[in-house]
Amino acid sequence: RECAVILVGGPTKGTRFRPLSLNVPKPLFPLAGQPMVHHPISACRRIPNLAQIYLIGFYEEREFALYVSALSNELRVPVRYLREDKPHGSAGGLYSFRDYIMEDNPSHIVLLNCDVCCSFPLPEMLDAHKRYGGMGTVLVIKVSAESASQFGELVADPVTNELLHYTEKPETFVSDLINCGVYIFTPDIFNAIEDVFTERKDRANIRRVTSFEALQSATKALPADYVRLDQDILSPLAGKKVLYTYETLDFWEQIKTPGMSLKCSALYLSQFRHTSPQLLAAGDGARRATITGDVYIHPSAKVHPSAKIGPNVSISANARIGAGVRLISCIILDDVEIKENAVVIHSIVGWKSSIGKWSRVQIPL
Ligand code: GDD
Ligand code: GTP
């Protein structure tokens, strides 16, 4: 049996996504009409013998309660939200719920960042992980040398795929191969995290008797139970024959800014062509609006038959789109009203807004 964990962060994370994450937790912001976290969850359903999906974060329980209970009814796999009392870092968060996770006695833990947009090739990655026989496998992708420094940069053995070297967001260029924030681990990952705690305690004890300056720098350090997967686990274990890489040639983006949500919405809409065509709007019925390209329209939205919509448009619940409206590359959130003959291009229209007739909303690309 396998188990999946999605790291959703909390209200103090995802600040670059504001103001879109002020009303709704960033993981629930809609991309292609589905909450951001819905896309990795759907991907997890392709893992054979999946016992549980856990969402770990430090948002209030009630912010996820509705979503999680609706989802558990819909999926055959139980989904549970586990709340940390405070941020423990990406590895620390996972570690704090080790007892829950190990209850199912999983042979692997699939760990996903929720703010990446990707085809999540999890079954393929799991097969590769079993072939490598290590403790962990990291999904990696080649990006341009200029953008690589925003991510964890790494070097892998071209033959064995072993992770040889890892640096998180380095100042000087290391490699154009980067960490996608998608991992497969054996339960040994918990021992590796524990080793970090032990080592920190030992170091703190030595410092206490050596020098005053060392003690000062130790107190400035992160809380003792804060462990980052990248810096504290991947970096030191690189080159030790326990971590491997699996390269994806498919799409991958990180979702940190509002502008990125438009790009990622487009990527997921085009993926729906293959995975869930029933979610895409069909155009050109006698009483339907004209649709071009990939478009999602929530069943409760009302779209006038003379409107022209697409490509890359997603329209959320209870939106009203008037006669003669033109929408291109945009996200229309819940309860929005767009009046007659308005044009909206490359924009996100926030909850409950109203756009007057004949207006034009367009941010130049
Ligand atoms: N539950 C919980 N608790 N989740 C957390 C915590 C925490 O304390 N801290 C971060 N997360 C979640 C975030 O919500 C996000 O989904 C994921 O963990 C990683 O967040 P960060 O640790 O802030 O790293 P990052 O997003 O800047 O970069 C990481 O991901 C990149 C890929 O998107 C790194 O691993 C990079 O190397 C990698 O390229
Ligand atoms: P980058 O992609 O990193 O440059 O971020 P960005 O947000 O500046 O991207 P860009 O300027 O390409 O924004 C794309 C579209 O996203 C804009 O036309 C806006 O419609 C929308 N957008 C960006 N930020 C916000 C926001 O804070 N609120 C709303 N409602 N829409 C936003």
Image (tube, rainbow, N blue to C red):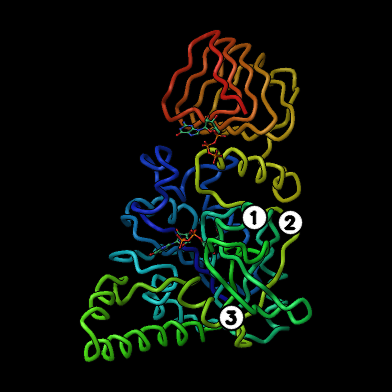
Can you tell which of label 3 and label 1 is closer to the viewer?
A: 3
Residue at x 41% of width, y 26% of height: 352
Residue at x 37% of width, y 88% of height: 199
158 or 270: nearer the eye?
Answer: 158
SS class, disc 1: strand
Residue 103 x, y percent position in the rendering: 44, 81
Q: Which mark is residue 118?
A: 1
Q: Which residue is mark 2?
A: 250
SS class, disc 3: loop
Residue 264 x, y percent position in the rendering: 61, 44
In the picture, the quarter occupied by the C terminus is top right
Q: Which mark is residue 235?
A: none
Q: Are marks 3 and 2 in contact (CB under 8 Å)?
A: no
Amino acid type at image mark 1: Cys
Residue at x 73% of width, y 83% of height: 131
Find the distance from the CA under tag 3 to the CA under tag 2: 25 Å
Respond yes or no on whether mark 3 lies under 8 Å from ligand 1.
Answer: no
SS class, disc 2: loop
Side (left or right) of 178 relative to 189: right
Find the distance from the CA under tag 3 to the CA under tag 1: 24 Å
Looking at the picture, does residue 244 appear above or below residue 5? below
Can you tell which of label 3 and label 2 is closer to the viewer?
A: 3
In the picture, the quarter occupied by the N terminus is bottom right
Choose top left, top right, bottom left or bottom right for residue 137.
bottom right
